[in-house]
Amino acid sequence: MDARRAAELAARNSYGRLVAYLAAQTRDVAAAEDALGEAFLAALNTWADSGIPQNPEAWLLTIARHRLIDVARRTQVQTKVLNKLKLDGLEWQAEPSLDAVIFQDDRLKLLFLCAHPAIDAAIHTPLMLQTVLGLNAVQIASAFLVAPATMSQRLVRAKAKIRDAGIALELPDARDLPTRLIAVLEAIYAAFTHAWETVDGGDPRHQGLAEEAVWLARLCVQLMPQEPEVRGLLALMLYCEARRETRRTTNGRYVPLSQQDTQLWAQPMIDEAERELAKAATYKQLGRFQLEAAIQSIHAQRATTQQVNWEALALLYEGLVQLSPTLGAYVSQAAAIAEAKGSDQGLQQLAALPTEAVKHYQPYWALKAHLFKQLGREPEAQQAYTQAIGLTEDAAIREFLLHQSRSN
């Protein structure tokens, strides 16, 4: 493995953990990110010459820590930070064995810190996506439909708020956890979705991000086992992860859900998801993630029934759009209605959506093209396929849509 590849994998696997640990010592998220960024740059230069260390994560932590100490010394105004680093044993007279470096995982604490009431609620989820899950401002801005520069400025202000207010990296009191929970769950799911939407298999960091999202959801379940939406989110992601390996053929071609070989789905993951969803239902507090998980449960049942209950799916989507009226939910509802009641009914649902809202929404155009094709309306299907293909960034999905547009 070359140095760049090793550094990229270390960044994906360790970024959130390292930032959280360093931020816990300094109460300065931005400084922790800067120091870690310099450590990754140093890794690219050093590892290429001296080889990849046995413990890359510990190596990065050591370099980042020294960067923080150097900055504190130069500025002098950060005396408290420097003293804190010394007291915590982070400044050593002699360099220890890198393999001996041990630090706790503070990612969950950092998630709840980012949802602190002193920070603008609109930036809670974006802040988590960047500081804990490693997405950049451009990726986050795209998800929230704002300019990258605007998102970057908001993130900078939020981190300054944490530093200037001296907000501690710690879990809030039990009574305050529920008020911050929804933002934490939204961030975890947004990170998972970002990884899930890329199916061409070209970047292993996406799978690592999905695995990290599932792990964070498990931590949330341990922390708040009686919160049904936490279990609903974990179930939702497990249903999806169970199908990950069947989304592409061995030669990289995209396989839609309806064509996947159900025998290749990871049944232990599906079974775990079913248990989590059933446990969530016992609390009788229905929420968005439980509904989305229930939708995935219907799809998972195809592994035993060999068919999909589209009427049940349409009803679940009706409930979902009432609880969480997102564009994705409306388009998915239209797809379920088309299967249950006919393509013309699905098109009517799509026609009710605001033109400006769907203008750049790829799933809308892909579904519209499919339904036009089902009805034999070829010119309209081709026009919709052109729109969908033009909005598709994933190479595997683009190739799939091109094939669909050319086939009879």
Image (tube, rainbow, N blue to C red):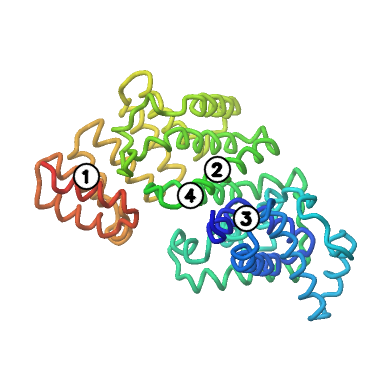
Which numbered disc covers residue 211? 2
Is residue 283 in view from this perspective?
yes
Disc 1: which residue: 348
Closer to the eye: label 1 or 4: 4
Residue picked out by circle 3: 132
> Which residue is drawn at the image coordinates 30% and 62% (left, top)?
356
**Do the CB atoms of the residues marked 4 and 2 lie less than 8 Å apart?**
no
The alpha-carbon separation of the residues under discs 2 and 3 comes to 14 Å
Q: How many marks?
A: 4
Q: What element carries label 1?
A: helix
Q: Which amino acid does label 4 sit on?
A: Pro
Measured Cα–Cα span from mark 1 to mark 3: 41 Å
Q: Are the two marked residues, 2 and 3, in contact with CB atoms closer than 8 angstroms?
A: no
Label 2 crowd (10 A; few <14 / some 14-19 / many >=20) = some
Q: Which mark is residue 204?
A: 4
From this view, report whether residue 202 is shown above or below residue 291.
below
User: Which structural element holds mark 2?
Assistant: helix
Q: Alpha carbon of mark 4 to alpha carbon of mark 2: how far?
A: 11 Å
Q: Where is residue 307 in the image (x, y as percent from the top left)?
A: 30, 23
Q: Earlier in the sequence, mark 1 or mark 2?
A: 2
The reply to whether residue 158 is visible in this rendering is: no
Q: How crowded is mark 1: few (under 14 residues within 10 Å), some or many (20 or more)?
A: few
Amino acid on which the number 1 mark rests in the picture: Gln
Upstream in sequence: badge 4 or badge 2:
4
Camera-nearest residue between 49 and 275: 49
Q: Which of marks 4 and 3 is nearer the N terminus?
A: 3
